[in-house]
Amino acid sequence: MPRELIDLYTGNTQTMMRILLFLATNIAVVLVASITLSLLGVGNIHDGQGGMNLQALLIFCAVIGFAGSFVSLFLSKWMAKRSTGARVIEQPQTQQEKWLVSTVEELARTAGIGMPEVAIFPSRAPNAFATGWNKNSSLVAVSEGMLQRFSPAEVKAVMAHEIGHVANGDMITLTLIQGVVNTFVMFFARIIGNFVDRAVFKNEGSGPGIGYFVATIFAELVLGILASIIVMWFSRQREFRADAASAQLVGAGAMIAALEHLKAEQGIPVELPGEMTAFGINGSLKHGLAGLLMSHPPLDERIAALRAGNYR
């Protein structure tokens, strides 16, 4: 089979797998939310008189908002392996694999966390990521491209950065923040939707009209963008802290060298799936207002922070 067809087939298969994983996650969220709401006895969020039961609405939004975040967190390792094609090193077969596992083991022991699963994923771009629902049940993975072109000291520094994410509890913290913003986006979007339905569309019925649904969807889009700015700001701060953890584990010089190497290869597209980008060592570079939605700070800023000794 021609190489182009092989690449096309592989790409389509990976895309389909990501779609199936996305659908499976959302079905799980709906099931968990439905069961939880039934147990809580939460009824209709509309009071039948044109108003809203704010207590029931807040509970409803919190359950849906946090359920989505926590289901994604608990499935994070499973989804990461399948969406990136990562291969977990069960029994190291080569000297490189033995070195990688022993390096991660050493870093994890020094950082005071449980031994993560160690994986390699197919990607020409230099990248790595960490995920998992707690410090003692995590996964760290590195791309084939990074292993091929980065020096052992640079790879070790990147692994230390990922171990820093795990030791700092970044995955659970980001989940909590995402759950909070999800809750308030849904809550205020529905209040806005109800107001527009009654005040603008003049709906006087006992239930919500078309204006409610249209306004709620629009409000969720706008509020969702604003909420994403908050979440991505936190994500950028996590990167500075993970860089600091790497500097403390292996030295600032090694981490600076790794970031400089990443900078030199910025022309290679980042091949992590969208949902994994925030957990990688290297994110896509954006400018202007789009920079507010970057999951990673510019590499120059990260290098400058390490050189200024801000990791102490």
Image (cartoon, rainbow, N blue to C red):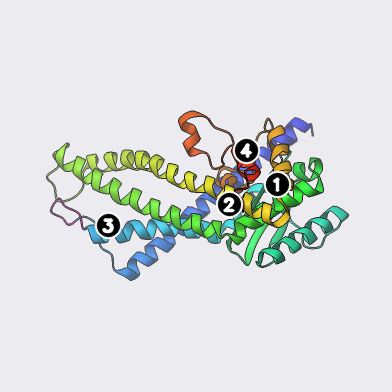
Residue 299's disc number: 4
**Quadrant assignment for the C terminus:** bottom right
How far apart are the two marked residues, 3 and 1, measured between alpha carbons?
A: 47 Å
Picture coordinates of residue 95, whole percent (x, y): 88, 55
Q: Nearer the viewer, mark 3 or mark 4?
A: 4
- Where, by quadrant of the figure, is residue 103 drawn? bottom right
How far apart are the two marked residues, 2 and 4, measured between alpha carbons?
A: 14 Å
- Where, by quadrant of the figure, is residue 116 drawn? bottom right
Point out the stretch of residues depicted in magenta. 47-53
Element at label 4: helix
Which of the two discs, 1 and 2, labels the residue nearer the N terminus? 2
Query: Dot 1 surroundings within 10 Å: few (below 14), some, or many (20 or more)?
Result: many
The residue drawn where x is 68% and y is 35% is: 263
Identified by mark 4, the residue type is: Leu
What residue does disc 1 label? 255
What residue does disc 3 label? 57
Assess whether mark 4 and mark 2 are in contact (beta carbons under 8 angstroms): no
Q: Is residue 221 left or right of residue 287?
A: left
Which of the two discs, 2 and 4, labels the residue nearer the N terminus? 2
What residue does disc 2 label? 241
Q: Is residue 15 left or right of residue 199?
A: right
